[in-house]
Amino acid sequence: MWLMRVATWNINSLKARLDRLLGWLETAEPDVVCLQELKCADADVPIDALAAAGYETAAWGLGRWNGVAILSRVGIADIRRGLVDQPAFGDETEPRAITATCGPVRVQSLYIPNGRDVADPHFPYKLAFLKALADDVRANAAGDLPFAALGDYNICPTDDDVWDVDEWPGTTHVTKDERDALDAVKAAGLADVYPRALKHPQPFTFWDYRNLDFPKNRGLRIDLALANPAFAAAVTDAYVDRNERKGKGASDHAPLVVDLDL
DNA sequence: ATGCCGAAGTTACTTCGA
């Protein structure tokens, strides 16, 4: 028996969120954390502060946008940056995926492109990224090693994952094209680990900073843990730590926490 | 109370996010 806690969290700047991250690591005691939106270069990742908290870090960041990392206190090996045949945006291959083996599990930390607007070039880029992801995860999904692709997918899988779908008419995050692309990732052999409800029936993971969206629970479920059968079979609990969305200096996303008994 | 947007690069404004 190996009890593990794995989490994913879009922290919206590692530098701005470092104190909250360190506090959360201490109270939540995750073994593995997938982070997104570091908003800093590799060289600026505070690996010493994270090491002092007990975590090894694998990070890929280029600057003020994007950036992904995996923190682990159960070892970290076989680190791989990016996806096989990952599409570029403009002439840059953006830091949106990193994969590593941490103890008995292999995890991928993902920051799927936003899409911006269905008429924007960022939208076909988003779909192309998801296509590359579906191909990339296939071997890990079919393997015996517990594997999960966790992160900010920037897609609401169903209308029930939106606080009010009428407020999102034909916009990114809810289109059929995006949901079909997400379904293709799942069809590669991964299942959505759906978090249990806490205060509200819908386990949202994101609330915009504006318009009192968090107090009014105008949220989206866009941060997902997609697990292969070996990983999914080990899940004992999953929830969104919405307390981390409260107070001064919060990210606009809350951590998604998954407990395992391997 | 969970409270009316925030981060970062650059320096008063812009880009991006979902």
Image: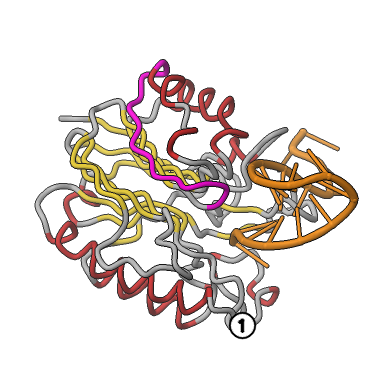
Instruction: Look at the image and say whether residue A61 sits in the magenta stretch.
Output: yes
Q: Which stretch is magenta? A: A52-65
CA neighbours of label 1 inside 10 A, class few (<14), some (14 to 19), many (20+): few
Colouring scheme, one of rainbow, by chain, secondary structure, one colour: secondary structure
Q: Which residue is nearer to you in this view: A216 or A184?
A: A184
**Quarter of the rendering occupied by the C terminus of chain A:** top left
Tell me the SS state at disc 1: loop
**Quarter of the rendering occupied by the N terminus of chain A:** top left
Q: Within the image, what quadrant is residue A28 found in?
A: top left
Relative vertical location of residue A2 with respect to residue B6 in this rendering, above or below: above
Q: Position of residue B1 (x, y in %)?
A: 77, 33
Residue type pointed to by label 1: Gly
Relative vertical location of residue A32 with respect to residue A86 in this rendering, above or below: above
Residue at image position (59%, 53%) is: A206
Q: Within the image, what quadrant is residue A246 found in?
A: top right
Would residue A205 appear left or right of A225 to someone viewing this image? right
Q: Mark 1 points at which residue?
A: A170
Q: Where is residue A155 in the image (x, y as percent from the top left)?
A: 49, 67
